[in-house]
Amino acid sequence: MTAKSATAAARATVYGYPRQGQHRELKKAIEGYWKGRVDADTLRTTAAGLRRTNWLQLTGAGLHEVPTGDFSYYDHVLDTSVMVGAIPARHRAAVEADALDGYFAMARGTQDVAPLEMTKWFDTNYHYLVPELGPDTVFAADSTKQVCELREALALGLTARPVLVGPVTYLLLAKPAPGVAADFDPLTLLDRLLPVYAEVVADLRAAGAEWVQLDEPALVQDRTPAELNAATRAYRDLGRLPDRPKLLVASYFDRLGDALPVLAKAPVDGLALDFTGAAAANLDALAAVGGLPGRRLVAGVVDGRNIWVNDLAESLATLGTLLGLAGRVDVAASCSLLHVPLDATAERDIEPQVARWLAFARQKTAEIAVLAKGLTGGTDTIAAELAANRADLASRATSPITRDPAVRARAAAVTDADARRSQPYTERAAAQRARLRLPLLPTTTIGSFPQTSDLRTARADLRAGRIDSAGYEERIRAEIGEVISFQEKTGLDVLVHGEPERNDMVQYFAEQLTGYLTTQHGWVQSYGTRYVRPPVLAGDISRPEPMTVRWTTYAQSLTPKPVKGMLTGPVTMLAWSFVRDDQPLGDTARQVALALRDEVDDLESAGSSVIQVDEPALRETLPLRAADRPAYLAWATEAFRLSTGGVRADTQIHTHMCYAEFGDIVRAIDDLDADVISLEAARSHMQVARELAGHGYPREAGPGVYDIHSPRVPSTGEAAALLRKGLEAIPAERLWVNPDCGLKTRGWPETRASLENLVTAARTVRTELSAS
């Protein structure tokens, strides 16, 4: 861009912002409410304060328009279900009795009522609550939350834009309600839903909204002609509403493809498009349809999902090209900043050179403001910012931190044979049965046990120097002893050490691998009040020394039953980290896989007969477009096999996946060549077992019978019923019995009761099988 630009003043904005607060105040308030320590008014006051702080931070950073409605107590898709009145029948009484308690009941369940199903939000690690719809669903508008939050922002004198999940995406994310035919298509409810959206939009207009944003990320996936026609109808009808606010339709996470002409032709006032990564293809596609003459384009040129500083010059070049394609061009992140931590300046322990490369939510808003200024006034107005940005980018590109020749040489020497077990599964299964001697329907858990306040206190005391490493390790040994003792008394067949020493299933390993760095305050919402601190993958990966062997070996010394070695797989190590963007993901995955291979080999040498390499993120990282999936699955499955390919036939390799749509990757699950896979199945009523059976999956599987993301304790009868449903799809000799996921977030009382019921259910069904 030239120093003098003729463009109208560009506005800077975002689609959403981290909800938790600088010190996770929202998490603490909500969990306090659940425990009865915080009342509803205090919770609402805390939430309102966090919204105000967020908006003022955004405007203080130079943003001209703030989002409203993106803030949530639990999940924005659940908020949308409330907004349109799609309350499941089993929760209506609770919602009518107390809206807030009913809301949390839908999210978490109660002892008597199951929650909504939970799954991943597109290809992120954020989980949303799946709407349950059927032919009898009656929608009814409730715009209370959206209107109230808009009015809060307007009262501060801010320019605010309500953000809603769009009607097409909402229906495409939904599933048939329990008892509804599996082939029911929620999209058939569109004509019933649109008048409700029209009412909400009208309410927002009456409350003072000039613009309303409708998010349609589902349109970046491959869509059928019928689905694209639904989008055409939706925005034809909404666009023709009388006396409406201006409508901005947003998409993100990938390129729009065939949906772009649909939206470009719709009678709406603007589009918000992602122009980062694969979505950069939106630029040429927008030009091909003639752009958006006379309309608004919000250009997502700052990556909203990763934490590296933006290349300001490159983004300005993109923005300059876009100027000729729309009536006005504004600047934004590529998606909501919900997916990144709040503030990089809070990280005091990161090496200063590396800290220069990082941009969390606050830093990204500053980048957006700089780009808007440069787009309006030309490059001379941001010359100092551009020079500093060039220096930061050069520092990273030339840093020895990012490259290790030995790691690269080892990865380059990998052969196809390295990523294959030396024996076929049938031979391995026989050898493992002879070694392990497990009963029919063997019982186990996924790995972690409750992380008690005592454990968290012990870690904090160690960091603060209040106890020494010897005192800390004694506490860990005692916890492992308690976990092993409980499992033996309960009657579980394959045990775990409980992972008391681990802060997080990815961070724990990242802290012990070269090439990673970890944060102190880099919290990101995973679901509800569950926040994680994704490590940052900054350089080449290697394992200096064993990471898990010591504690696994100690646990095994306490029991004659097999104790699983527990590792996090290479794809999940990438998916739940902020990955480097300066080399292909497949190259990074191979480096991580080789580091894990060393750990697997050491566990086997130390006597482990069962080793679990978790890959819950395999489906999550699946590209949104089918054309991109074969290449991803090739390197992802190779990385897993490379991690596990060196063990003996009688060493049983497990893997675990949870909270995803597994039907899309059943063939890839087979290609992992694990001996046993455990999967989430309780909330989806054993759907995955049917999908495995339909594929002809030949190995052993443990579809979960205990939903660990709810505080309710499943009864023996409930677990047995799910187990019997699993047996309809998977033969008893290949069926395992386990929870959906790890037990880290649960309390000990519910964990004890639930696992006791799980073991009793397995014994009950074993007896039934022996009698039949």
Image (cartoon, helix red, strand yellow):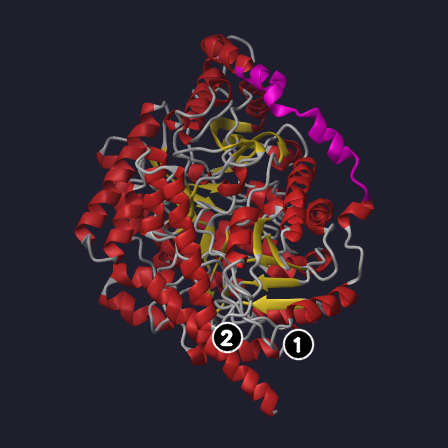
**What is the C-alpha distance between the residues marked 2 and 1?**
32 Å
Location of residue 666 with respect to 736 vertically, above or below: above
Number of numbered discs on residues: 2
735 in magenta: no
Task: Name the quadrant of the C terminus.
Answer: bottom right
What amino acid is at disc 2?
Answer: Val
Image depth: mark 2 or mark 1 in front? 1
Q: Can residue 659 be seen in this view?
A: no
| 306 relative to 259 in the view: left or right | left
Which residue is rendered at x = 61% and y = 70% of the image? 689
Q: Which residue carries the number 2 mark?
A: 180
Element marked by disc 1: helix
Q: What percent of the width, then of the height, locates residue 615?
A: 60, 52
On the image, which quarter does residue 54 sit in?
top left
Q: Label 1, on which residue?
A: 733
- Please name whichever residue, 268 or 516, is drawn nearer the observer in this view of the structure: 516
Residue segment shown in magenta: 392-415
Asked if 261 appears above or below 709 in the picture, the reply is above
Question: Residue at the location (53% across, 38% down)?
Answer: 510
Q: Is residue 405 magenta?
A: yes
| x and y percentages locating residue 620 in the rendered image | 57, 50
Judged from this view, the residue extending furthest toward the bottom is: 771
Which residue is depicted at the point 35% across and 56% down? 83
**Element carrying mark 2:** loop
Mark carried by residue 554: none
- The type of residue carrying mark 1 is Glu
State yes or no: discs 2 and 1 in contact (Cβ < 8 Å): no
Instruction: Please indicate whether residue 30 sits to the left or right of residue 718 in the image.
Output: left
